C-alpha cells in the first residue's frame, strides 16, 4: 500500500532536525520526504502538524514467555508496544527457563512472530541457566537469530568465566550486554544508600557498586576486544570511566532506563512498591547527570526496561516485593517530560530511543531516510492525560506513573508501512 503522511513535523535523529513536511510510504519503505505531490493511488493521512518520528527500538523488554505468561505474553506486549510507539522490541532472556539453547530461542521466535503486531528480536543468555558457570553455545544461538547475549541482572561473579565468555564472543563478533553491578555489595539491597533509605529503614547499596561493576567489565572489554553494551548506567560516578573507555577506542556503548531519567529515590515515598526498580532509584543529582549524558551522547540508548509483575508479587512489604515496572506504553510520554522540561530535544530523544539502539544491533530501523523501513510513530507531544494503569494493554499493571498527569499521546504506529495502531481503536 502507498501511504502519504501529510503536514507532519518530521523528527530526524540522524540530522538532529525537526522540520515540517510530508512522508511517502511505498512497499513498506520510506520512499520520499519533503513537500510531496499526492500519488494517484495513495492513502492520504493528514497529520495536522503533529510529530512523526522513527518508531522506538526498545532494548531490554521482559516478556513472560516461556514460564510466566500470566505476567505478559507476546500478544499483550506487542499490543502495548504498538500503543506506545515501540515498533521493535528486543526481549531479555530472563525467562523460565532461560533462553539459553537454540531450541528455546527458536520456540520464542515462532511464538513472537505469530502473536505480535510489532517486530521482536531476542537476546540469549550468556551462560547456561544464567548461572554464571558454563558458557552457552554462542555460535549456534547467533545462527538461530540471537542479537545479543546477556545474563541480565545475574552478574557473572567468576571473572575468569566472564573473560572466557567475552573472548569467545569477540571471535564471533557477538554483542555482550552487561549489568554493571558488584554483586557482593548489592546483595540484599533495595534502595540507594543515603539519608532517605536510612530514615525508611531500607537496606541500601552504595552507588560505588555500579562503578565497580562497570570498571571490571571495561577491563575485560579492553582485554578481549569484545563488543559491549552496559544495559543501565544510573550513577554519575560511572560517567568518567565510560568516557575514558570510549576515548580509548573500545567498542563500548551504554544505556539508561527511562525511570532513572524521570524519577529519583524520593519517589519511593511511603514504601510504594511500584517504584522498586533494579538498579534502585538514585539521587536527583545522579538523575540530572544521566539526562546530561544522554544529551551529550555519552549515554547512547534509552530503554523502557519493561518488567511486568503481577499484583501478588507487588502487594508485599517493600523489601519482599518483586522488582521492576511496566513501561512500553508509558515510555514515550515519560521521555517527553524531559522535552517539556527543556532538558532534551526531540531529535536527541529519538537518537537515544530509535537510531542508536538500531545501529548497535545492526538493524535498518530507527531512521527517517529514503529506503529505510517505514517503522514510524505519529504522536501529539502536547496532549495531556492522567494515566490510569488499568487501561494499559500489558497484562501486568505495575507502573509508577499511575494517577500522574502526563503529556504526549501516540496517535498512530506503523510497522513496515502497515498501520498497527490508531488512537481510539
Image (spheres, rainbow, N blue to C red):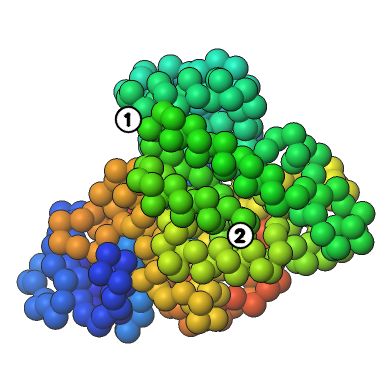
Count the labels in the image: 2
* Residue 17 x, y percent position in the rendering: 28, 75
Mark 1 residue crowding within 10 angstroms, few (<14) / some (14–19) / many (20+): some
* Direction from residue 255 to residue 179 in the image, left or right: right
The quadrant of the picture occupied by the N terminus is bottom left
Residue 352: quadrant of the picture: bottom left
Q: Nearer the viewer, mark 2 or mark 1?
A: 2
Whether residue 179 is visible, yes or no, is no
Q: Secondary structure at mark 2?
A: helix
Residue at the disc numbered 1: 173
Q: Earlier in the sequence, mark 2 or mark 1?
A: 1
Image location of residue 376, percent across then percent down: 32, 62
Question: What residue is rendered at 32% in x and 30% in y?
Answer: 173
Which residue occupies 85% across, 58% down? Answer: 197
Name the one closer to the observer, 5 or 167: 167
Q: Position of residue 393 (x, y in %)?
A: 57, 55
Is 194 rendered above or below residue 104?
Answer: below
Q: Is residue 10 visible?
A: yes
Measuring 50% from the left and 39% from the top, which residue is drawn there? 218
The quarter of the picture where residue 384 lies is bottom right
410 left or right, relative to 23: right
Out of 177 and 404, give the one closest to the viewer: 177
Seen in the picture, residue 150 relative to 34 is either above or below; the reply is above
User: Helix, strand or loop at disc 1?
Assistant: loop
Q: In this figure, which residue is indicated by the disc labeled 2?
A: 236
Residue 125's disc number: none
In the image, residue 140 above or below residue 267: above
Residue 230: x and y in percent read 51, 45
Amino acid at each position: 500500500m502507498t501511504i502519504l503522511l501529510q503536514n507532519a513535523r518530521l523528527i530526524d535523529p540522524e540530522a538532529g532536525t525537526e522540520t515540517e513536511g510530508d512522508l511517502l510510504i511505498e512497499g513498506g519503505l520510506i520512499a520520499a520526504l519533503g513537500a510531496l505531490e499526492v500519488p494517484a493511488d495513495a492513502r492520504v493521512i493528514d497529520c495536522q502538524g503533529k510529530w512523526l518520528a522513527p518508531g522506538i527500538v526498545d532494548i531490554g523488554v521482559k516478556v513472560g514467555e516461556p514460564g510466566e505468561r500470566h505476567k505478559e505474553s507476546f500478544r499483550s506486549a506487542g499490543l502495548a508496544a504498538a500503543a506506545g510507539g515501540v515498533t521493535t522490541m528486543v526481549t531479555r532472556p530472563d525467562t523460565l527457563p532461560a533462553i539459553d539453547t537454540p531450541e528455546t530461542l527458536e520456540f520464542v521466535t515462532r511464538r513472537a512472530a505469530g502473536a505480535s503486531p510489532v517486530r521482536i528480536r531476542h537476546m540469549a543468555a550468556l551462560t547456561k541457566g544464567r548461572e554464571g558457570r558454563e558458557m552457552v553455545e554462542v555460535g549456534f544461538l547467533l545462527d538461530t537469530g540471537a542479537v545479543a547475549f546477556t545474563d541480565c541482572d545475574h552478574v557473572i561473579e567468576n571473572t575468569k568465566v566472564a573473560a572466557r565468555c567475552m573472548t569467545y564472543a569477540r571471535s564471533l563478533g557477538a554483542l555482550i550486554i552487561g549489568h554493571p553491578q558488584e554483586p557482593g555489595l548489592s546483595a540484599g539491597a533495595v534502595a540507594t544508600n543515603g539519608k532517605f533509605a536510612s530514615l525508611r529503614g531500607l537496606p541500601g547499596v552504595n552507588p560505588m557498586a555500579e562503578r565497580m561493576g562497570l570498571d571490571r567489565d571495561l577491563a575485560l572489554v579492553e582485554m578481549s576486544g569484545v563488543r559491549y553494551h552496559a544495559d543501565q548506567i544510573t550513577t554519575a560516578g560511572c560517567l568518567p570511566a565510560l568516557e575514558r573507555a570510549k576515548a580509548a577506542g573500545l567498542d563500548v556503548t551504554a544505556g539508561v532506563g527511562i525511570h532513572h531519567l524521570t524519577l529519583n529515590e524520593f519517589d519511593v515515598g511511603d514504601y510504594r512498591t511500584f517504584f522498586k526498580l533494579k538498579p534502585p532509584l538514585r539521587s536527583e543529582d545522579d538523575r540530572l547527570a544521566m539526562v546530561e549524558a544522554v544529551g551529550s551522547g555519552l549515554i547512547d540508548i534509552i530503554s523502557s526496561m519493561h518488567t511486568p509483575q503481577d499484583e501478588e508479587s507487588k502487594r508485599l512489604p517493600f523489601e519482599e516485593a518483586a522488582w521492576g515496572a511496566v513501561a512500553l506504553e508509558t515510555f514515550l510520554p515519560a521521555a517527553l517530560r524531559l522535552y517539556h522540561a527543556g532538558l532534551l530535544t526531540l531529535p536527541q530523544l529519538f537518537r537515544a530511543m530509535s537510531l542508536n539502539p538500531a545501529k548497535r544491533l545492526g538493524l535498518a530501523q530507527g531512521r527517517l531516510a529514503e529506503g529505510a523501513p517505514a517503522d514510524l510513530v505519529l504522536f501529539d507531544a502536547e496532549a495531556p492525560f492522567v494515566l490510569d494503569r488499568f487501561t494499559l494493554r500489558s497484562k501486568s499493571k505495575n507502573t509508577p506513573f499511575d494517577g500522574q498527569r502526563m503529556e504526549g499521546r501516540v496517535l498512530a504506529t506503523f510497522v513496515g508501512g502497515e498501520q498497527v495502531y490508531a488512537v481510539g481503536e
